[in-house]
Image: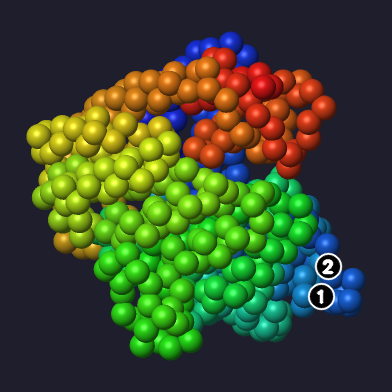
Amino acid sequence: MSAVLLSLPLISIRSFMDNKLYNNEVAFELQTKKIDENRQGETLTVERPKQVDSNGKKYYIESYGCQMNFADSEVVASILANAGFDSTPEFLDADIILINTCSIRDNAEQRVRHRLQHLSAVKKKKKGALIGVLGCMAERLKEKFLEEEKIVDIVAGPDVYRMLPAMVEEAETGQKAVNVLLSREETYAEINPVRLNTNGVTAFISIMRGCDNMCAFCVVPFTRGRERSRDHRSILKEAQELYDNGYREVTLLGQNVDSYRFSEDPKLVGKKLVDAKYDEGVVNFAKLLEMVAQIAPDLRVRFSTSHPKDMTDDVLYTMAKYDNICNYIHLPLQSGSNRVLDIMNRTYTREWYKERIDAIKRILPEAAISTDIIAGFCTETEEEHLETMDIMEYAQYSMAYMFAYSERPGTVAAKKFTDDIPEETKKRRLTEIVALHRKHSLEHNLRDVGKTFEVLIEGTSHRSAEHLIGRNSQNKVIVFPKADLKPGMYTHVKVTDCTGGTLIGELA
């Protein structure tokens, strides 16, 4: 199994253990900014609002990459539907084909290029059909799309989706419609996203856009622009509407949610907090988290992703105060070496990170912690690799997203450093990291055997129609008999068995 996993470095690897029917039930369980292989190329069908007249044009959209991209596709669908466009699940029937893209890994970009060639068949069938590229790839590779991909008519960056109806009109004249300008203000705050292919139980809410953390390995600041927080009132309105429509869990989504900070006064927004308090007239993340939790006691609240340098105790105390804020924190480590963290520009030390782990365990003793780890970053020594594994032993993560480093053009690392770690060394270090995490994950789950958890039911098991799957507060997936229960309901499940990645239980 390891050899297969290592050939897919962009996939999170959650422990794979052989155990009964439920083996690999959630082997590729992914979230937020991570690449979910099961969703790549996902399409949608959206009903146009009844009060909006059709303009007679059909669009087709495919999404690739992280959860931020899928959330953006929901925004795009809403904008087009309200402009009179109708969606179609068949690209050959479409007048406009849109591909929402990702630049986080090279093979993600190559996949999109190959897909564009396949989708170009629509131009042979339908005269005047248009093809557009949206998102991170559009911003990063605008010139290449125009020069090399002759089939592309529209190139739209992640901050210009409001302009898509006008860009379609421009492209219909035979001109290339290109706009990849990044904004310091755009948050799509008042746009109510269309929920795509959802289970009707859980939903993501984007609370901010962009990122100010110039991590050396990351392309996001260059493709999504500077960080800006969305008006908390629009977030609360969206969360309330989701709850009223039957959703029972929301995940507050951002590149770095802990730095969320909204105020009508831009001078206050620019003043970052370093203690556990929030200013008068400013809504920081702890306050936002509390506001969303107060919407309803049976609305679960999650968030992702946190940055260790910005996670203050006020967030942890807010989580402890409300039972419906889930006991789960994703806290990326990346490396356990101070020197490597420094050249990664992570702006924290291993000592700081361990103190944050201590704070989580002190304030939220039942919390599960997950992480991101990069194996084989530029110049990483064997001793520094062992330092990363030392932090893993210290933190005992319940889940981890583990990658072998791959250089991305345009990043600080690509400009300043040489990708000098041999591939075989990267793979060997990643194998060791995966093996250690598999051990921790299984131990973590074994400690849950015999315990009873409140579970929010999300749907039917992929392995058996007679079983349901849901999650507990710690974000662990539990499989249990169906009985008369339905998605969206809460139930209590006693854990009777487990794999490295899944809990198995019976109704309590």
Q: Who is closer to the viewer here, 418 or 289?
A: 289
Q: Residue at x 77, y 57 (%)?
A: 245
Is 424 left, or right, of 133 in this rendering?
A: left
Rendering coords of residue 279 (x, y %): 38, 77
Q: In 3D space, how far apart are the residues under numbered discs 1 and 2 (Cα atoms)? A: 7 Å
> Are the residues tagged 1 and 2 within 8 Å (C-beta)?
yes
Q: Residues within 10 Å of mark 1 (few under 14, many from 20)?
A: many
Q: Amino acid at mark 1?
A: Gly
Quadrant of image for the N terminus: top left
Report whether 298 appears left or right of 178: right
* Mark before the other along the chain sequence, 1 or 2: 2
Reading the image, the residue beneath label 2 is: 48
Relative to residue 213, is residue 271 depicted above or below? below
Across and down, in percent, residue 131 comes to 65, 66
The amino acid pointed to by label 2 is: Arg
Q: Residue at x 63, y 34 (%)?
A: 455
- Find residue 136 and name its label: none
Residue 84's label in the rendered image is 1
Q: Establish if 200 lies above or below 270.
A: above
Q: Is residue 473 left or right of residue 429?
A: right
